[in-house]
Image (spheres, grey):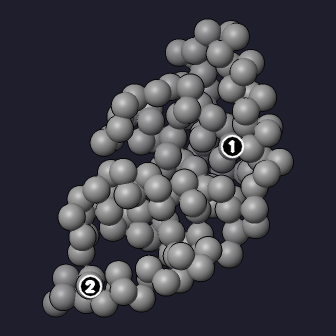
Amino acid sequence: NPLQLLPAILRLLMPVANAGSARAQVRLGDMYAEGRGVARDFAAAETWYEKAATRGDTAAQMKLGAIYAGASGTTRNNNIAYIWYGIAARLGATAAQSERDRIGALLQPAERTQADKAIEDRVARIRPKT
């Protein structure tokens, strides 16, 4: 039964994620977001996605954009959603471009300008993905 493997998977992923593996961090985020093998915890999912996102993982950046755009377990924040989608788009995630543009249409021009600066600042600080 695959569900019986989840606690073992969690025990294996945790030290790898804590060591900085973006792939493991995204998997842990998914487990928490979906409540697979752990209690559903959107705050924990967001934390793990953010760790991976700051390492350049575009899937994690897209997931964070979706969390903030759709308010899954957090307060809806179109500015933050736009920033995460914008970072993913700048790093080559083509699907992020349309999402960034969709959310950007909801922002005021001054908000978009400020968010675009935040995107450039964050992209410049991205640590390499492992």
Q: What residue do we see at 44% from left, 70% from top?
A: 27
Q: Which residue is mark 2?
A: 7
Q: Earlier in the sequence, mark 1 or mark 2?
A: 2
Q: What residue do we see at 83% from left, 48% from top?
A: 124
Label 1: state its secondary structure.
helix
Label 2: state its secondary structure.
helix
Q: What residue do we see at 59% from left, 79% from top?
A: 19
Q: Nearer the viewer, mark 1 or mark 2?
A: 2
Q: Position of residue 116 (x, y in %)?
A: 74, 28
Q: CA distance from mark 1 to mark 2?
A: 33 Å
Q: Is residue 126 left or right of residue 101?
A: right
The answer to whether residue 98 is seen in the rendering is no
**For residue 102, which quarter of the picture?**
top right
Q: Which residue is mark 1?
A: 87
Q: Position of residue 56 (x, y in %)?
A: 69, 59
- Other-residue count near label 2 (Cα within 10 Å), few / some / many at <14 / 14–19 / ≥20: few
Q: Position of residue 87 (x, y in %)?
A: 69, 43
Vertical relation: 112 (above or below) 75: above
Q: What residue do we see at 57% from left, 50% from top?
A: 61
- Other-residue count near label 1 (Cα within 10 Å), few / some / many at <14 / 14–19 / ≥20: many
